[in-house]
Amino acid sequence: MEFDFAEEQPKFLMLMYGLIAFVAVVGGLLLLLDVVPAWFARRREAQLVAASTGGGPLPRRRKPREGLFALFFLLPTLLLLSIGLVVPALRTVLLSFMDAGSKDWVGLSNYSWMFSEDSIVRVLLNTLIWVLLVPLVATSFGLLYAVMVDKARFESIAKSLIFLPMAISFVGASIIWKFVYAYRSEDQDQIGLLNQVVVSLGGEPRQWLLDSPLNTFLLIVIMVWIQAGFAMVVLSAAIKAIPADIVEAARLDGVSPWQMFWQITMPSIRPALIVVVVTLSIATLKVFDIVRTATNGNYDTSVIANEMYNQAFRYGENGQGSALAVFLFILVIPIVIYQIRNLRQQREG
Amino acid sequence: MTTATPTVGAGAQAAGKPTTTAGRVRNRLNSRTATLVSIVIALLWTIPTFGLFISSFRPEAEIKSTGWWTFFTDPQFTLENYQDVLFGSSSSSGQLASYFINSLAITIPSVLFPLAFASLAAYALAWINFRGRDWLYIAIFAMQIVPLQMALVPLLKFFSTGVTVAGVQLMPAWNLVDEQKFAQVWFAHTCFALPFAVFLLHNFVSQLPRDLMEAARVDGATHPKIFRTIVLPLITPALAAFGIFQFLWVWNDLLVALIFAGGGNETAPLTVRLAEMAGTRGNEWQRLTAGAFVSIVVPLVVFLSLQRFFVRGLLAGSVKG
Amino acid sequence: MAFARSRQALAIAGVLGLALGAAACGTGNDKKSSDAGSAECAAYEKYGDLDGKKVTAYSSIRDIEADRLAQSWKQFEDCTGIEIDHEGSGEFEAQLPVRVQGGNAPDIAFIPQPGLIKRFVDGGNLKPVSAATKTEAEANYSPDWLKYTTINGQFYGAPLGSNVKSFVWYSPKTFKEKGWTPPTTWDELIKLSDTIAASGTKPWCAGIESGDATGWPATDWIEDVLLRTAGPEAYDKWTTHGIPFNDPQVVDALNRAGTILKNDKYVNGGFGGVKSIATTSFQEAGVPITTGKCALHRQASFYANQWPEGTKVAEDGDVFAFYFPSIDPAKGKPVLGGGEFVAAFTDRPEVQAVQTYLASGEYANSRAKIGDWVSANKKLDLANVPNPVDKLSVGILQDPKTVFRFDGSDLMPAAVGNGTFWKGMVDWINGKDTNTVLNGIESTWK
């Protein structure tokens, strides 16, 4: 079977169409925004001339035009968001008040189900553990590493290695961690690294993913392993961006590394830190693939997104699945409020 | 960022000056320890992946019965896993190269569109004055939490039946076949990426110095002009950063591709093929060891080639000009 | 069987590829004109002219198995001019509902869960089959098989492939060496287990880990035992919730299964203690038989594909299977099994023609010849079934004395059958007691 390049041609053609569409849409939008205001400007000039010669009142402007600009800048985003996310979100909220087949209204019963079922309460609890631990651990690790590796030798290699897990698909990651947590009985060769370490230290091999709550923490390790690279890369870039003269001045003054970290580094990278923590928190709330591939939520490890997927798609319980999704929306409210506060501060500052 | 300078002054004054020879030596030692520790951690971090890498060269029976580290005492080497993955174990699913091309055709526009749309939106939200912009920004930000699983069905309906409101067909169905389905995938990925993209880029765009913007306005530059000539060049590192994350996300995505592209070799990306590779009952999972490495090559190249943008500074490459 | 043996598989794949490639080059888009009218095509004339028509099919069948599927209807495609575009995915069970709800359903789907079929029927998504398909199905399959897709008096799809789950795998070679014989009653089975245990080997090995379907092999165990202790009628009531999930008969069955599965003297050969069953993947669970670390493994006929490369699967080979013995002779010779059904979401004539064809004897024989396939189709000629385990399975399925029952977890609503039942079995293996587990599952069946 020879590879037939001609067969692949329609794909490249399609890719080209896509790129042409991209240029047309984005270029067209920018052009439009350039041309139209210019036309308005000319008209206004004419009006000004007319007003000054005629002695009439000056036409008022600025506000409406700014709004119009904003509208065009935001148009593609708003359009796509309403189709792709706003409508689905509203639909999810509606479905959460309906039965499994989305036929009849059932009021709040999906929500009361959520809090009365022990296994689901456990799911909510697990999600809480995840969202408290992952951002904290991944961010602090990423930050420490970024500080430590800054200007060290082999910096870019070391950073690439930490970032590597982010480039691996979940299919790959699930196999990788299988080789870490796998269990074989004592009389056999271990194929899991963790058990091999335990055995060579004279211990007995354990079934890591069976025991709650240890297993949840072991799954969190996987998430941290993947996400720490994100935190590290963003924070490291922020550290690099601290103006050299500030750092130099501090160094000349003989500031200790500890003071340097708390008094210079931390305040300087605060915006980046917020981005990282917020992003990781949201990613953690939505975590799905790790749990699904490692345990599928067995042994008390399930989290909201995994349970939601199972309920809505595998079990055909649309109402219960949607209620879980709505609960996710509610969990994000604290982060949103925090974000509003930040924005206020920024505007004032 | 703006608060940095005053704090520094205070801290520096209080610290005093232990710049003795001993102090310098200690500093050097510190940095050497730091280098050593950071390398050790990097290696630890890589061990699981390294294990997979070694496993990908081991025969199936070995993978399934002994640990990958036995490779060093009892090396058994085979390329069969790679052969299975690269040249196919199944004839009807075609060549891996096909899926590679699909992955590229899906990923490139799926990165470009959100990048462009989000930077436009981020600029508007940060620098154009209009009523309710903060609330709009918060709303877009909050949209990040909508689980994409819940968006699959409505979006699929949008493609396959169009939009009908009260019996009036506002938009027809897309009715795409074969490679045209890429358009659906681009659309879906763009939708799902926008909230995070707007959030990330807004953070950088809003950090640009106010003086710069105001000077440009005074010179009579319009918003589109400021956006093109001042903002875009300054946020290139941020664009590169988001570009990488979006690239990785799309390249490694399975769920969106399964729904919107289907599983044939006309449209399905690499991940879909790899997931199928394990066989109907998943017993050939050793192939995934090699598959994971085949699929990692492209994202790694992208990361390494764009890495210099990170090193130059993601946040305020701008401030330094 | 060559599934696990990559080299052989590659060879088959190569030959297949050549054949497909040659056909594609030689005839191009015009494939019907050159083939139609030839002798082989006579059998397909009844399906009429389907030239240029296209039917999409969706299933969980992938990789080599998908190649074989494509190969099996190749002649039908060539002769009628139809094109069957099959797509297989490991995410089938979760993706199909998404596609259906999203208005993007395939023409036909091979659905292994009658429970899922019922859900689609209730949702008004599936189309009943044509009269021709129904006639064909009634001629070729026993009523036992047809009742699963007969809902509200309408028939929604004939079976395609099947499997027999009531098998215990063993090593004829080891048995011969040690002087053991395959048991034919439950008591003999337990006696044999004790003998083996006394010889220092743990007799049974088991594993129920299966990714996001973890737990299913244990549900098969329980169903097989229940079918033997309570009988087919009680079993039917149980799967349709005519009796509660935690009925005393089920408690008994689970406890009886526990005398093997939760007995530290019996399990888990080659893997560890009882709890290791939960984390052992079902694909590798039986493999210790080949190394003598365990002797018995209860698993379906398709387990033939899981043995390591070079294992001879035959009555006189390295591994083979015997019928999971009956417990109460008065309850007959029940057989637990599974299979997939060809359900259609559209009723275009060409879709119905494909359904009819897939229910026919020609198809069953065509597919069986390629290998690794079992069907309950009565027209399937045993001579066309190449490997011994498949032959044994087909023999059992075609035996008029066999009382066949479908895998119960696939009949129940998915929230139970593919949800709490699976999870409950995992908890049960992991140490929870029988009553707690069964009461928990019952409480989720609304």
Image (spheres, coloured by chain):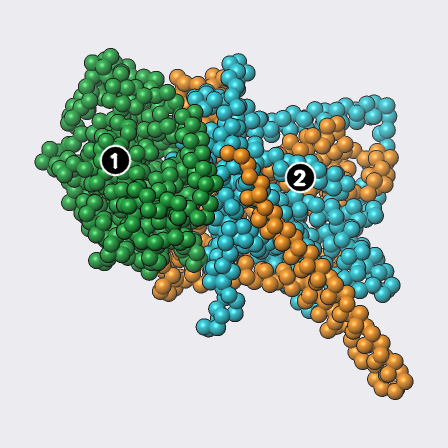
Q: Is residue A319 left or right of residue B228?
A: left
- Drawing shade for chain A: orange
Pointer 2 residue: B302
- Drawing shade for chain B: cyan
Parent chain of label 1: C
Q: Circle 2 sits in a helix, a strand or a loop, which is it?
A: helix
Q: Give the number of the disc on residue C81.
A: none
Q: Is residue C21 left or right of residue A37?
A: left
Pointer 1 residue: C164
- Drawing shade for chain C: green
Residue B80 screen position, x and y as percent:
50, 25
Q: Residue at x 35, y 65 (%)?
A: A104
Inter-mark Cα distance, 2 to 1? 49 Å
Note whether residue A18 is visible. Answer: yes
Residue A268 screen position, x and y as percent:
75, 45
In which quadrant is the C terminus of chain C drawn?
bottom left
* Residue that sits furthest to the left in the current view: C330
Q: Are marks 2 and 1 on the same chain?
A: no
Q: Residue at x 36, y 53 (%)?
A: C50
User: Do callouts 2 and 1 mark residues in contact (Cβ within 8 Å)?
Assistant: no
Q: Residue at x 24, y 22 (%)?
A: C315
Residue B193 screen position, x and y as percent:
60, 52
Q: Circle 1 sits in a helix, a strand or a loop, which is it?
A: strand
Residue flagged by tag 1: what amino acid is it? Val
Residue flagged by tag 2: what amino acid is it? Val
* Residue that sits furthest to the right in the current view: A53
Q: Is residue C129 left or right of residue B175?
A: left
Q: Is residue C200 above or below residue B203?
A: above
Note whether residue B188 is visible. Answer: no
Parent chain of label 2: B
In which quadrant is the N terminus of chain C drawn?
top left
Residue B87 screen position, x and y as percent:
51, 31
